Amino acid sequence: MADTPPGPPAYDPPMRYADGPTATAETTVDAPPALLWELVTDIGLPARLSPELRHAVWLDGATGPALGARFEGRNEHPRVGTWRTHSYVVELVEQRVFAWAVTDPDDRFGGGEADPDRPLATWRFELCPAPGGATLLRLGVRLGPARSGVSLAVDRAPDREERIVAGRLAELRTGMAATLGGIRALAEDRAAL
């Protein structure tokens, strides 16, 4: 089954970072939610599939997802360079929802103290049963409210904020489609065994 194509960003009224812009991608996977759950809660897997996340590891002795559990990510982007994040699991519903708030522990983007209640982004996987034993897999992100690399770009060109935000959301949709495509391929291979 095909992923949701990234497509051109559509925005009206004006899209501003302070409004918490979002992006979503989805795909239907010929595998049951239980199998997909193992994949989406494996925080190391997106580092193999994402164009930006390079590494992720649980912190504080955690070995898997639990509400409040933290993990560290290492990210890389051609315009921003490399940076470290700390993410906190903020929503967890077995075989349905895995969400985490991303913070900036090094204050690289000038947002102040890392606070999961004011993340630089919140990511969320949703799994919904679909006809024929398949699963609808959705990945979404909400930017802000804390400062991020987008904030740095807007600081340099405030008159281009809408274009900067729309461009970042399009970039994220492309990355999400790649991640979902990789998860779908792994899950369908395992389901066929």
Image (cartoon, rainbow, N blue to C red):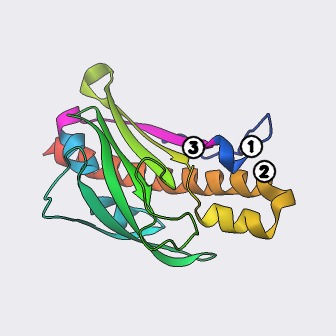
Q: Residue under circle 3?
A: 23
Q: Residue under circle 2?
A: 162
Using the image as rendered, state which of residue 103 and residue 25 is in the foreground: 103
Rendered image quadrant of residue 98 = top left
Residue lying at 70% horizontally and 53% vertically, measured from the top left? 165
Q: In this view, which residue lies farthest toward the front?
A: 113
**How crowded is the residue under tag 1: few (<14 C-alpha within 10 Å), some, or many (20+)?**
some
Q: In this view, which residue lies farthest toward the right?
A: 159
Rendered image quadrant of residue 9 = top right
Q: Name the element at disc 2.
A: helix
Q: Residue under circle 1?
A: 15
Residue 47 lies left or right of residue 103; in this view the side is left
What's under tag 2, amino acid-wise?
Glu
Q: Name the element at disc 3.
A: strand
Residue lying at 46% horizontally and 38% vertically, measured from the top left? 26
| 33 in relation to 55, above or below | above
What's under tag 1, amino acid-wise?
Met
Q: Which quadrant is home to the N terminus? A: top left
Q: Earlier in the sequence, mark 1 or mark 3?
A: 1
Residue 174 lies left or right of residue 9; in this view the side is left
Mark 1 or 3: in front is 1
Q: Earlier in the sequence, mark 2 or mark 1?
A: 1
Q: Earlier in the sequence, mark 2 or mark 3?
A: 3
Q: Which residues lie in the magenta part?
A: 20-34
